[in-house]
């Protein structure tokens, strides 16, 4: 499928290799001193093509205690980015083969999300991770959150908002009945995160890289995580057949130098904060520097929130190609997962078919 897309666009998408490791850009992009004019492709469009990364230390929501502060101080940035270097040195130390299965962070600056993956045998060493080394800058400002709401948090949902959580992995013993009841990420269909969007958000772990390819009628964004491909139809209309494809139904147009992408018909399995049925996500991609691709998103669902809200960040150039993300969990682990449930069923059937022992005579 990806090869066919590449042939249509006349460009070969980068793929190959056995791992999904990619290095975060070595330095945070700086703000441009003068208005930047994006170069044009031969087809006349602003050039967004290339391989970009959105890995950063800035999280989607604002850390507790920062209140309404949109920007970090220089001292806070220095501490955050300095701690990462310590984290890298500690995380790259050899793993003790006799380590306890219980992970103990070697330093107070270690990010808590690594507790689930590093440390003990079977976990990732730091070199396999790509969580970002720098605070995210937007127009040179070191941001405290991706969200641009006043407090850096999503707004309160309406009391009448329904719960749109994914039914892919229901609670209880029956969640192993069929492959259709396992998550799309576990089945290697789409990524297990919001890398592909919409909105497109780094996962804080790895594979936060993207390749943009343009043609007169389409823009394709290849997502490193689980080899996803977002296909944006330019100057088109939303489908009306009720089908909700993965990543939703994305149409786009050029607003000057900005690519605007509007996505609706998002499937329930890719809900965002509970919203999916009436969710509309509007994204804007603008090349604002040789090494800066500005991205913003607006979230709208009148059944969930009283007003639109969103966030913004800047992609940085990766400086190297992305490689195939060879997802094998769905190829090798899934049969074993489902077999466990089959064994339980066979045991229950055998127990039910076994004749009951005669009651002992009473005296």
Image (cartoon, rainbow, N blue to C red):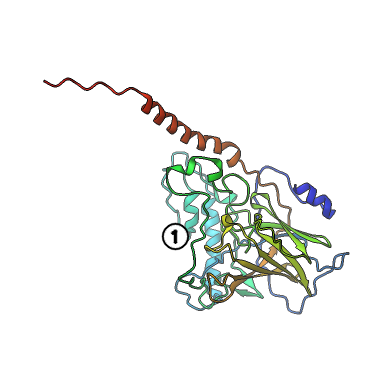
Q: Is residue 50 visible?
A: yes
Tell me if 355 is positioned left or right of 273 in this view. Answer: left
| Residue 35 x/y as whole percent | 76, 79
Tell me if 351 is positioned left or right of 296 in this view. Answer: left
| Residue 20 x/y as whole percent | 65, 48
> Closer to the camera, 306 or 30?
306
| Residue 69 x/y as whole percent | 52, 78
Question: Number of callouts in the render?
Answer: 1
Q: Hey, which residue is sitting farthest right in the picture?
A: 42
| Residue 233 x/y as whole percent | 76, 61
Q: Which residue does the image show at 74% across and 47% down from the upper left? A: 15
> Closer to the camera, 22 or 161?
161
**Which residue bears the numbered disc 1?**
108
Q: Is residue 122 above or below residue 84?
A: above
Q: Which residue does the image show at 47% across and 61% down from the upper left? A: 109
Q: Secondary structure at mark 1?
A: loop
């Amino acid at each position: 499928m990806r090869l066919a897309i590449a042939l249509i666009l006349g460009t070969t998408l980068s793929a190959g290799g056995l791992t999904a490791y990619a290095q975060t850009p070595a330095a945070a992009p700086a703000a441009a001193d003068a208005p930047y004019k994006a170069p044009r492709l031969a087809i006349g469009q602003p050039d967004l093509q290339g391989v970009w990364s959105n890995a950063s230390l800035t999280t989607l929501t604002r850390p507790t205690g920062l209140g309404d502060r949109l920007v970090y101080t220089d001292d806070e940035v220095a501490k955050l980015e300095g701690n990462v270097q310590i984290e890298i040195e500690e995380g790259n130390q050899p793993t003790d083969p006799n380590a306890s299965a219980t992970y103990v962070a070697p330093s107070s600056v270690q990010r808590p999300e690594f507790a689930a993956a590093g440390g003990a045998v079977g976990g990732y060493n730091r070199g396999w991770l790509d969580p970002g080394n720098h605070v995210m800058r937007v127009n040179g400002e070191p941001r405290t959150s991706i969200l641009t709401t006043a407090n850096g948090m999503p707004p309160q949902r309406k009391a009448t908002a329904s719960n749109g959580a994914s039914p892919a992995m229901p609670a209880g013993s029956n969640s192993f009945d069929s492959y259709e009841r396992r998550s799309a990420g576990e089945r290697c269909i789409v990524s297990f995160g919001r890398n592909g969007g919409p909105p497109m958000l780094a996962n804080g772990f790895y594979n936060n890289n993207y390749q943009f390819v343009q043609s007169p009628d389409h823009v394709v964004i290849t997502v490193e995580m689980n080899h996803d491909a977002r296909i944006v139809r330019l100057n088109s209309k939303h489908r009306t057949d009720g089908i909700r494809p993965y990543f939703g139904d994305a149409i786009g147009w050029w607003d000057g130098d900005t690519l605007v992408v509007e996505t609706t018909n998002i499937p329930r399995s890719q809900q965002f904060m509970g919203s999916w049925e009436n969710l509309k996500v509007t994204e804007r991609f603008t090349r604002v520097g040789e090494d800066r691709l500005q991205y913003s998103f607006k979230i709208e669902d009148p059944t969930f929130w009283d007003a639109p809200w969103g966030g913004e960040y800047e992609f940085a150039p990766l400086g190297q190609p992305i490689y195939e993300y060879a997802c094998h969990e769905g190829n090798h682990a899934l049969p074993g997962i489902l077999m466990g449930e089959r064994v339980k069923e066979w045991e229950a059937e055998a127990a039910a078919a076994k004749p009951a022992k005669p009651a002992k005579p009473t005296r």
